[in-house]
Image (cartoon, helix red, strand yellow):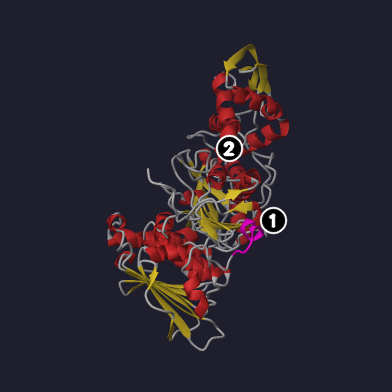
């Protein structure tokens, strides 16, 4: 082995390029982020051959002076941090000062820039990281243009790893989508092989932001999403979450931005997934675009070379904040919310539900109607209901179900008309026709009521006739001993009987018959991996959901009109009433336009 020596600067830059520059999209990311950090209001991106042959980024940001051009191509030269304090509170997208020299070392790069106070711009060319001549005057507007040609021309092994132009273009397109969602205030223009791909004006208000989202993710996302906004001490979460009915087969429409930076965070993603667990159909994935604002001192963005991951100082606080905000927003999606936010109920056939749900604590569930928890076989009892108005010119029915005219506002789900084959309730509201799956709807009502009662009464413990002993590691035994109060809070009675032995003496009553040893092992594994355990809560909710399913009204049950109306009123006041416990929709709306289309009226 040869003696220790310093590596040449050129080789150091190329090694750094291996971390920073994976493909053309990596170059685009670094250059566009530099433009955003410079205060640009408009950014233009031009690509040739997927970025393999040419990448050009032009902005109208602050620009650079003559002396700064050469300095910008040196390693660890940056205007964004100057001290350890700055590094601990990074507010810019870039800060390491490695991007430009790394990119220049594996390409032919030209850098042209002009400051606002200067009469002209300056230009510097590099070939493989080496300056090709001196800094020269150049005609250029205020701002900066970086042109990268022949990426990886001097590292042919790296160039061979590039995919087809179409594939590389797709990676750039996805990156631009994230950047466009991160900075609504910046206009973006994107051309590929001289063809316009994107031309997004700055979006300064809510309507313009949703228009940009519709162009980037499709109009269906915006039409089937809720806008949420919540603020706490040093934390703020805003954005859009897709309705459960707008879920996807893959987690390919999930975007999280932390302080304006697109990142991946397993804990935050799990918090969102858990918020959807009661309302999402099996093997489906939610859609969302969420913006989390955190005190920069509470988040470390310097944990990944590409800055695509972050680490939170208090991860549990972030998890709970995201989970609570998303779950409460979803709980606010109920028929009653539709009536409050719009004069007519939108069509649930296209799942066009309200786009904004107020984040609020769920209202207490009604007790005046529906099945009592201990009476799963009881029928829906008639409830005191506001009378259904009779349309002008219509004579009251003679079957005893007619209700006299009233000036009371019509509820969101309207009033029942009939029952179809003992399965569906047919109702009328101001928008048109409402169809309700009575079993699915009642299943959700009973489930939410059971959860509320279970939370109020606490966890009932079932003592084991024969305590179960299990061998664990010393670390797991220490953890169980330290978390004994947390275990007791969820109905697990666990004692330590030796350095590596635990004894389970009690389980939650609802989980009687469960494998006690495996349950404790699972909970310990969760705490070690995530900092706490949600497995028990999930299992208890599963048991409650199963009980609710078996305790709700069954198909072919004939209901009286008053019983149907009682069910509709309960739905309007129940969190997550749009889906049953398995994530299936509970009701749908056919508005008058949809009905007219069915019968070709007006065509």
Quarter assignment of residue 162: bottom left
Numbered-mark total? 2
Mark 2 / mark 1, whichever is N-terminal: 1
Q: Is residue 64 above or below residue 346?
A: below
In the rendered image, is residue 596 in sight? Answer: no
Taking the view exactly as shown, the residue that stands out farthest to the front is 3
Q: Is residue 80 above or below residue 303?
A: below
Q: Quadrant of the N terminus?
A: top left
Q: Foreground: 20 or 466?
A: 20
User: Around disc 1, counting alpha carbons within 10 Å, would you say few (fewer than 14), some (14 to 19), or many (20 or more)?
Assistant: few
List x then y, in percent, for residue 65.
Answer: 52, 79
Residue named by callout 2: 530
Relative to 275, 24 lies left or right: left
Q: Foreground: 451 or 528?
A: 528
**Residue at point 50% right, 80% down?**
66
Kindly report the secondary structure that dominates the magenta region of the rendered protein.
helix
Mark 2 element type: helix
List x then y, in percent, for residue 514.
Answer: 55, 20
The part of the chain drawn in magenta is 81-88
User: Around disc 2, counting alpha carbons within 10 Å, would you say few (fewer than 14), some (14 to 19), or many (20 or more)?
Assistant: some
Question: How much space separates mark 2 and mark 1, taking CA atoms?
Answer: 23 Å
Residue named by callout 1: 234
Q: Foreground: 100 or 220?
A: 100
Q: Foreground: 402 or 7?
A: 7
Residue 496 located within the stretch drawn in magenta = no
List x then y, in percent, for residue 78.
Answer: 54, 66
List x then y, in percent, for residue 330.
Answer: 58, 49
Relative to 306, 395 lies left or right: right
Could you say which disc has been placed on residue 258 in the image? none
Q: Is residue 243 above or below residue 481?
A: below
């Amino acid at each position: 082995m040869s003696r220790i020596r310093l590596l040449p600067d050129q080789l150091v830059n190329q090694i750094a390029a291996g971390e920073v520059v994976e493909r053309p999209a990596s170059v685009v990311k670094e250059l566009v982020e530099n433009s955003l950090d410079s205060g640009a209001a408009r950014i233009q991106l031009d690509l040739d051959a997927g970025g393999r042959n040419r990448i050009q980024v032009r902005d109208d940001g602050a620009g650079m002076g003559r002396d700064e051009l050469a300095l910008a191509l040196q390693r660890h030269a940056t205007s964004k941090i100057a001290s350890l304090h700055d590094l601990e509170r990074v507010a810019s997208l870039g800060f390491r000062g490695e991007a430009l020299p790394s990119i220049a070392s594996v390409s032919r790069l030209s850098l042209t820039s002009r400051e606002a106070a200067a009469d002209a711009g300056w230009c510097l060319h590099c070939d493989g990281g080496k300056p090709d001549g001196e800094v020269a005057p150049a005609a250029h507007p205020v701002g900066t243009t970086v042109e990268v040609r022949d990426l990886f021309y001097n590292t042919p092994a790296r160039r061979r790893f590039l995919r087809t132009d179409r594939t590389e273009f797709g990676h750039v397109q996805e990156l631009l989508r994230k950047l466009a969602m991160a900075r609504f205030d910046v206009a973006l223009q994107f051309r590929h092989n001289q063809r316009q791909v994107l031309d997004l004006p700055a979006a300064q208000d809510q309507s313009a932001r949703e228009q940009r989202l519709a162009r980037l993710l499709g109009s269906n996302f915006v039409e089937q999403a809720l806008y949420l906004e919540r603020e706490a001490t040093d934390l703020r979460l805003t954005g859009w979450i897709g309705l459960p009915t707008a879920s996807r087969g893959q987690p390919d429409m999930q975007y999280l931005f932390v302080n304006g930076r697109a990142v991946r965070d397993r804990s935050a993603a799990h918090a969102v997934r858990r918020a959807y667990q009661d309302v999402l159909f099996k093997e489906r994935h939610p859609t969302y675009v969420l913006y989390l604002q955190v005190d920069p001192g509470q988040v470390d963005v310097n944990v990944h070379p590409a800055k695509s991951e972050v680490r939170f100082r208090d991860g549990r606080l972030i998890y709970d904040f995201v989970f609570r905000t998303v779950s409460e927003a979803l709980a606010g999606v109920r028929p009653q919310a539709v009536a409050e936010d719009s004069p007519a109920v939108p069509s649930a056939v296209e799942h066009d539900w309200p786009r904004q749900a107020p984040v609020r604590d769920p209202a207490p569930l009604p007790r005046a109607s529906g099945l009592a928890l201990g009476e799963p076989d009881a029928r829906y009892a008639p409830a005191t209901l506001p009378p259904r108005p009779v349309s002008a010119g219509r004579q009251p029915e003679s079957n005893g179900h007619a209700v006299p005219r009233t000036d009371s506002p019509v509820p969101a789900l309207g009033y029942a008309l009939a029952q179809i084959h003992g399965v569906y309730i047919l109702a009328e509201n101001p928008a048109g026709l409402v169809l309700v799956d009575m079993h699915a709807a009642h299943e959700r009502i009973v489930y939410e009521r059971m959860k509320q009662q279970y939370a109020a009464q606490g966890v009932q413990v079932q003592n084991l006739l024969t305590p179960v002993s299990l061998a664990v590691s010393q670390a797991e035994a220490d953890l169980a001993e330290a978390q004994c109060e947390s275990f007791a809070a969820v109905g697990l009675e666990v004692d330590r009987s030796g350095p590596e032995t635990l004894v389970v003496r009690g389980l939650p009553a609802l989980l009687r018959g469960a494998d006690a040893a495996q349950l404790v092992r699972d909970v310990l594994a969760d705490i070690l991996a995530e900092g706490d355990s949600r497995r028990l809560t999930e299992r208890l909710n599963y048991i409650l959901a199963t009980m609710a399913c078996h305790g709700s009204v069954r198909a072919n049950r004939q209901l009286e009109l008053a019983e149907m109306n009682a069910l509709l009123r309960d739905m309007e006041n129940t969190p997550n009433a749009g889906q049953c416990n398995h994530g299936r929709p509970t009701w749908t709306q056919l508005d008058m336009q949809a009905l007219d289309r069915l019968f070709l009226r007006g065509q």
